[in-house]
Amino acid sequence: MHRTGELYGQFQTLDQQKEASTLGMWVFLITEIMFFGGIFLAYTVNRHTYPVAFGIGSNTLDLKLGGLNTAVLLASSFTMALAVWSSQTGKKKLIPLFLALTLLLGGVFLGVKAVEYSQKFEHHLVPGRSFHIPAEDVPARAAARDPDFATHAQLFFSLYFGMTGLHALHMVVGVGLLLWLIRGALRGRFTPEYSTPVEIVGLYWHFVDIVWIYLFPLLYLIDRRK
C-alpha cells in the first residue's frame, strides 16, 4: 500500500486518517462490549438463580490480591493517559517512559493473576472431578438452602475463570501493543501531528481496565458483609 511518511495512500490528510482510525477502534470496542455483555448476562442470570453458591464461591477468592490488581490497573490507566498526553504535546522522551510504566503495571497484573490461578488449582477450586470446597467454608444453612451446592459452586468458578481468563487474554494483547508502541516511540515516530497509534491503543487499554472495574465487585465482593 502506498505510504507517504505516516500518511497512507487512501487518506488525504493525517486528520482524516486519525478520524477513520478512531472510528474503527470505537466500532471494535462496541463489538467487545457486546461480547462481554453476553458473558455478564450469563453471570447475572446464574447469580440470581444460585445466590448461595455464588456468595460462598466469591468468599473463597483472595480479596487482597483482587484489590491489589484493581489498584495496579487504575495506575496503569493513569500512566497510559500520560503517554497519550506526552505524544500529543511533543514530549518525545516521556512517551517511552510512560509506556514502559504501563507495560510494567500490566505485567504485574498478569503476574498476580497467575498467583491467584495457582492458588485455585492448589485448593481444588477448578471445576472438574477434583473440585472441592472445604466443609468449614460452607455454612449448614447454605447447604440446606442449596442441596446441589457443589455443582452450582463449580458454575461460579467456571464463570470466574472464563471472565477473568478472557480479560487476561485482552491484557496480553495490550502488552503486545505496548511493546510495539515503545519500539516506535524510541525511534521518535510519535509527534503532536501523528499521535494516533498511542491514542488508539490508549482507548483499548482503558476499555480493558474498565472491564476489570466491573469484574472485581461482581466476582470478589459478593456477600462479603457476612
Image (cartoon, grey):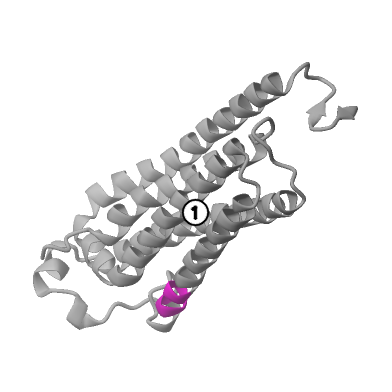
State the residue in front, 16 or 174.
16
Task: Tell me the residue at 51%/31% (across/down).
Answer: 30
Q: Going by the image, does 168 lie left or right of 42?
A: right
Residue 212 on image: x %, y %: 40, 52
Q: Going by the image, does 76 lie left or right of 91?
A: left
Q: Kindly identify the amino acid type of the residue bearing the numbered disc 1.
A: His
Task: Tell me the residue at 59%/52% (across/down).
Answer: 94
User: Is-magenta flag for residue 98?
Assistant: no
Q: Quadrant of residue 87?
A: top right
**For the N terminus, which image quadrant?**
top right
Task: Tell me the residue at 68%/54% (across/down).
Answer: 182
Task: Tell me the residue at 64%/54% (across/down).
Answer: 96
Q: Is residue 130 visible?
A: no
State the residue in front, 121 or 206.
206
Majority SS type along the magenta span: helix
**For the C terminus, which image quadrant?**
bottom left
Image position of 146 with respect to 78: above or below: below
User: Is the residue marked by circle 1 packed among few (<14), some (14-19), or many (20+) residues within 10 Å?
Assistant: some
Q: Quadrant of residue 88?
A: top right
Q: Quadrant of residue 176?
A: bottom right
Residue 192 on image: x %, y %: 64, 33
Residue designated by label 1: 167
Residue 27 on image: x %, y %: 57, 28
Total marks shown come to 1
Residue 66 on image: x %, y %: 34, 65
Residue extending farthest to the right is 2
**Which range is magenta?**
115-120
